[in-house]
């Protein structure tokens, strides 16, 4: 059943205390196996995650680097489907209200059916969409259905976005604006490398993106990177470094514990003992 209550994403930012940074974590649905996704999401929340970006694997990902491409390929081999992703979100909703954003590409959604996808995504408890290969100019193919079912659509800005485009993205986005810290695909990079290029970019973002909260992603791999790169925005996004940590530890007996310790350290800066 669809409700018209305020979105979980909007509520999260409204309730944020002081200058605490929101941590959004990306996880590929069905990676490293179909049975772990729900436990990972719930574990992330307990260790400081504020938002989950749940990746919908696709065979030809436009914005993803080798790490997330690998995770998507494994998930597809594991038999992940859109229906199974929706079931995972439903399972999370039995015990958690953490905002969940579905992140992926437009082709699988077109195949599923725009209206049907938005309906089913909302009914399972998802809160919004990030679709990197859907430019704002072409987003009307899904934006009306998303609005009908109270799904936020989060658009991206990058260092090569014009001032006018940043304003347009701000006007069209709801939830937050995704600030891509560097041009190129996803992947962990040296924090200093990202920070040097990101300061001027974030200065422009803060000038032209004024309606929505702003989260910065691409290249963050540890707590120090997050503090450095997200100092002028509302929070940060980590994906590839998290997938790398899963890949290094899975399927050892303590893989989940090690991954959750990494998440805790990302947020708070100290390892759990």
Image (tube, grey):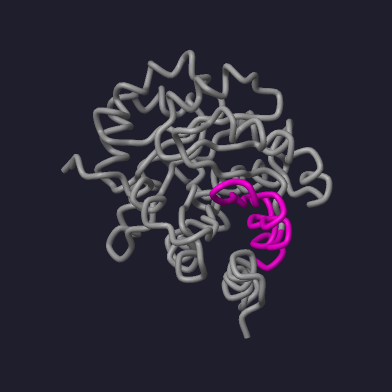
In magenta, the rendered stretch is: 222-250
* The quadrant where residue 143 appears: top left
* Residue drawn at the location 61% of the way across and 78% of the way down: 253
In this view, 251 is above or below 193: below
Query: Can you say which quadrant of the picture contains the N terminus?
Result: top left
Measuring from the top left, give residue 116's x and y in whole percent. 28, 29
* Residue drawn at the location 67% of the way across and 43% of the way down: 218
Left or right of 207 in this view: 85 = left
Measuring from the top left, give residue 119's x and y in whole percent. 26, 34
Q: Nearer the viewer, residue 34 or 139?
A: 139
Left or right of 2 in this view: 145 = right
* The quadrant where residue 7 appears: top left
Query: Can you say which quadrant of the picture contains the C terminus?
Result: bottom right
* The quadrant where residue 21 appears: bottom right
Whether 256 is among the magenta residues is: no
Q: Most extreme residue toward the top, as rendered? A: 137
Measuring from the top left, give residue 173's x and y in whole percent. 44, 30
* Residue drawn at the location 71% of the way across and 35% of the way down: 185
Left or right of 126 in this view: 33 = right
* Residue drawn at the location 47% of the way across and 56% of the way down: 34
In this view, 163 is above or below 15: above
Measuring from the top left, give residue 70's x and y in whole percent. 67, 45
């Amino acid at each position: 059943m669809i409700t018209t209550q305020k979105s979980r994403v909007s509520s999260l930012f409204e309730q944020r205390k002081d200058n605490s940074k929101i941590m959004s974590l990306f996880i590929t649905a069905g990676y490293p196996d179909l049975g772990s996704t729900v436990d990972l999401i719930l574990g992330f929340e307990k260790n400081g995650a504020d938002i989950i970006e749940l990746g919908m694997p696709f065979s030809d990902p436009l914005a993803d680097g080798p790490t997330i491409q690998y995770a998507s390929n494994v998930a597809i081999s594991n038999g992940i489907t859109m229906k199974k992703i929706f079931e995972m979100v439903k399972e999370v909703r039995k015990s958690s209200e953490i905002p969940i954003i579905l992140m992926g590409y437009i082709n699988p959604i077109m195949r599923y059916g725009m209206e049907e996808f938005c309906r089913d995504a909302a009914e399972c408890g998802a809160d919004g969409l990030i679709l990197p290969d859907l430019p704002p100019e072409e987003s009307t193919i899904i934006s009306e259905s998303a609005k009908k079912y109270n799904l936020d659509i989060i658009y991206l800005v990058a260092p090569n976005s014009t001032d006018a485009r940043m304003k347009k993205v701000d006007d069209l986005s709801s939830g937050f604006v995704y600030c891509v810290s560097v041009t190129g695909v996803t992947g962990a990079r040296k924090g200093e490398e990202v920070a040097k290029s990101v300061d001027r970019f974030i200065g422009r973002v803060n000038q032209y993106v004024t309606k929505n909260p702003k989260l910065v992603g691409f290249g963050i791999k540890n707590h120090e990177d997050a503090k450095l790169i997200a100092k002028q925005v509302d929070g940060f996004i980590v994906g590839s470094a998290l997938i790398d940590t899963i890949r290094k530890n899975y399927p050892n007996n303590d893989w989940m514990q090690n991954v959750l310790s990494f998440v805790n350290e990302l947020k708070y800066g100290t390892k759990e003992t």
